[in-house]
Image (cartoon, coloured by chain):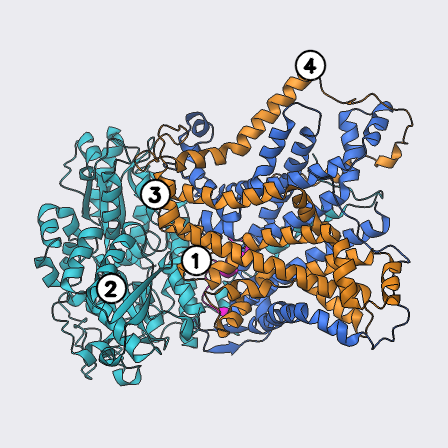
Chain colours: A orange, B cyan, C blue
Amino acid sequence: MATEPSTAARRPKQANAHALSPARARRHFDQPVGWRLAARYALLVAISAIVLFPVYTTVVAAFKPGDKVFRNPLVPDAFTLDVFSSAWSSGNLAQYLLNSLIVAVVVTTAQVVTSVLSGYAFALLDFPGKNVCFALFVATLLVPLEATLVVNFDTIDSLGWINTYQGLAVPFLATAFGTFLVRQVFMTLPRDLRDAAAIDGVGHLGFLRHVAVPLVRPTLGALALFSFLSSWNQYLWPNLVINEDDRNTVQSGLRLLSKSNLDEPNLVMAGTVIAAIPIAVVLIVFQRQLVRGLTAGAVKG
Amino acid sequence: MTKRPTVGANSRRAPGASVLAALAALALVAAACGGGESALRAGEDDPAPATAAPQTDPPDTAAPGTDASPPATTADGSVPATTQAAPVTTLAPLAQFPDCPTDALDAADGPVDVLFWHGMTNELESELIALTDAYNAGQDSVRVELQNQTSYGSTIDKFINASQSSRPDLVQLPEYTLQQFAESGTVVPVAACVEASGHDTSQFLPRTLSAYTYEGIQWSMPFNVSDPVLYYNRKVFVAAGLDPDDPPVTLEELRAVSQQIVDSGAAAFGIVIDSGPDSGGGWFIEQWFGRAGAPYADNGNGRLGPATEVLFDSATGVELLTFVQEMIDDGLAVSVGDNPDGSQSLLKMVDPDTPGAMTIGTSAALGTVIQVLGSGTFAGLTPEDIGVGPMPGPSDVPGAQVGGASLWIVADKDAAVTAGAWDYVTHLTSAQSQSSWAAGTGYVPVRVDALDLDPIKTTYADDPRFRVPYDQLQARADDITANAPVLGPQREVRVITARAVAAIIGGADVQSTLSAAVADANAAIAAYNSLN
Amino acid sequence: MTAVAVESHAPRPGDVRRPRRSPRWAEFPLAMGMLAPSAVILGVFILYPLGRAVWLGQQRCNTFGDVCRSNGFDQYVDLFRSVEFQNALVVTAKFALLTVPLGLALGVGLAVLADKYLRGLGVFRAIFSSTVATSVAVASLMWLFLLQPSVGALANVDFFNALFPSVKDPGWLQDPGTALTAVAMSSVWANLGFTFILVTAGLQSIPKDLHEAAAVDGAGGVRRFWSVTVPMLGPTLLFVLIVLTTRAFQTYGEIDLLTDGGPKPQDSTTTITYFVYGQNSPIRSDPGLQAGSAVLLFVILLALSALQLRGIGRRIHYGD
């Protein structure tokens, strides 16, 4: 195994052991030069090659016609776009992408709304049973999704929601995580703001809508991206509740595509490329939110 | 090493370290406090292994010529004559099961939608779509919608999980689900449809009907019947100085041929094997037992009454798996492991560096293999270079049991839907459909009259490879092992045997591994029987 | 990329607010109204199923779930001690021990490597972040093709399969000794972008002054890494650790697509989640055992979370 359990013992002293010196080192003081620079580049290039290798083989395969795909997997010795068009049409990928998009947008919107509402209640309202309620909310954070799916499937089934967008989305319309996140950021709002609004006769809902939400928009953006990615990447749940091709999400659809086209890896690879592109675009567009979105979870701690 | 984050500005033990340490501890604790019992025995009051079955197995050989598998008809109370005195075949009265209103289609206004779940992939799916399109275009009272559930396993899981209203109207299920689904109360026995519509089943191969008969009732309609065949590379045979028209039939021949191939350097391995539940780890073992005439389970392979125990640790089983193990040990065979989709063993035959010359696989792969090779995918290998022979096995005479899958009509649907599903079933199993289906895929036509129709008529005449699975099925003598064993938890049992086969391939002791697997399988059967 | 590593939204002491003039019941209806949507969803889809699963877990059912028999809660003990569950537990723990430290080390290493002033840095950063765009299905299918032993890409690179013959025979996903590591590799690869982005952001939030001061004090690169970078990254690393650990315990898609829980006989890649939901799982057709295993997974994660929360508690009280 790749672990060495005893490194903790070798842990050096903490940062504050080094007193901050007022003296300024020269700019870019640790910029590598000479062979160190070359070595660093070499390392970066080598690692980049390793990281990109699976992507490379995928793309090469996706552009190969059927009679070439099992040969010279590393050499792009043939080029055709036919595979993409047949993956697109026979693979039903447009439908999968649309389904994933619908579900992810619904889930994201709903999670933001429900989180704002409940987060506000926990942060700025006072009511009996608040602590118990909050404890219950937080407790749900500890329940892994996998522990609930067996029963959730039955629930969704008895509602007649198998093969529906509701079935895909409804269990995820609210999260304790979002509630917690929004509550935390609402608690940092200056108390005077709410007091002043109350004096002006602005109710809680008005305050929420016109003052509180605009102030925490970055956090909500982060939550939204986080929700969107989580929803988009759901794998197990769609595979459980979807059994008709027209309702497959990208993830469950790719599974179908791969399992029913074993003899055409180029088709499957083209499918994965198509499936990866939209999310890559989203991530490039929302780069800033991405970091916040991914780190949003850190406030759990 | 950067795996020990420190936290904040304190010098306490990092939580990261403690989590990782806890994980390591977890692994150790798990190893230390295991009970050594299968999860399938959880909740049993008595931890002792499943009790011995009340009726135990007959001797390994059934008297040849014994006709224990009469063609399915409705239960008329007659007990088939058999040399196995006990137990008497249980016969269930058809009337107690859901009926099949086959005439309801006439009363329906407008086309009826029938939802069909299947597990056909690759070429098989294309052929099924073609058959279905022809059906939908050919009449306007039923419209069939296909839903590919990616595999038999997924189909079963999804069917079981769903409530009756979320289930399809028609479902394709593999042969090993017979008892489980017959006892599930979720399906209409097709015997009821046959009876209600007066459908003529006289042209069907009797074996295909009896394969899907449980307790005297035919539960499902055979549609895609396959059996395992030997795929071999004819070029390698020639290079090794072997006759490419004379593939090995017995295990001894298989060994000799493999030896010659390896010795001549024509290929790195003689045969590619696997340990997948639906191939080398389960299905083929059942087939080999049938070929040897040895029962796989008690109570007449589970066909005279519910099986209570499996018998694959008998001398037959030990002999077979010792053979497999020695082939591996001697470098004559190579295993591709679990082979989840059945393609890994075939791909090993085209490995550019260390290929195998032969493999055993379902005949249903034949259409896909020919199609893939025909498109020039593998340099220097044309469809004609692949030979097909009967599955080598423990006897001089080829023989196989009915494998593949059948069509099940789901209960509690609208009468018109049930009637529509039945109508579609009769289309899929018509002589013409079966002829095209068999020619496109490598499946065995389920009826004799299909053989007189093109395209299969021409195919059988021109390409004997397609005929191998048919002849092999017909060659099998009628006795109690002519049909595949039936077990309640057969899918689980196959997973258990697959695990044993993988262990044996890896070098484990054959007898003790098989005995342990039998104990696990019997526990699974006991648990199943206690709940059904 | 913005340089927001960890936003500290934690309440500061003395910041606990109670709107002054409101009697406690006055806001009750409004609060209930605002909580209702979340509460209904969380109640119906998390708390109820958990409670129900705890009940189901002491039952054995037939395949179709219409005949069930209660065996008492000691069935959980049987289940926990069963060979299959123990195996799944060990596999899951091993998987976490493979993916979490390696993922962290790679993420931090690459982030530090790509944190200097170098020409073309943006390109390298983009490459290292790129895998964040792959979902589990996409990543697994890429690796499935890569690792196919007969015709796959790696198996047919001559120097590579000379170096590692097992990539061809029997194949990394087919060899019980390597399968879990191979799945872990694909998982580490897929998570690399996530870790890299987070750590890079964390690095950028460390004031350069700290490094410079340490350098003036004579600390070399390695020394600075341990005494400045790592402590300052603490919260980020903790977060990454938690996420990677949780993901490891919930691994399903990779297994479903790459190995189906195999190779047998040891079921070398059957994680707990795959044991519960996987296609070839022996308990796949027993809702009682499925629910029971899911509850055990919950309990195990709960224990791990307790450890993590202890760490979090410390950070809030003593951390930055």
In percent of width and height, residue A17 lies at 88, 34
Based on the picture, tell me whether residue C233 belongs to the magenta stretch: no
Q: Which residue is mark 1?
A: C280
Q: Is residue B131 left or right of residue C29?
A: left
Residue at 54% x, 45% y is: A279
Are both tags, 2 and 3, on one chain? no
Label 2 to label 3: alpha-carbon separation: 28 Å
SS of the residue under disc 3: loop
Q: Which mark is residue A264?
A: 3
Whether callout 4 and callout 2 share a subunit is answered no
Q: Nearer the viewer, mark 2 or mark 3?
A: 2
Q: Which residues are magenta?
A: C264-287
Residue A187, horizontal then vertical, whole percent:
82, 58
State whether the magenta stretch is mostly helix, strand or loop: loop
Which chain does tag 4 point to? A
In which quadrant of the rendered view does residue B443 lie? bottom left
Camera-side mark, 1 or 2: 2
> Label 1 crowding class (10 Å Cα cut-off): few <14, some 14-19, many 20+?
many
Can you tell which of label 4 and label 2 is closer to the viewer?
2
Image quadrant of residue A191? bottom right
- Respond whether the residues carrying marks 3 and 4 are from the same subunit: yes
Which of the chains bears the disc numbered 1? C
- Identified by mark 1, the residue type is Asn
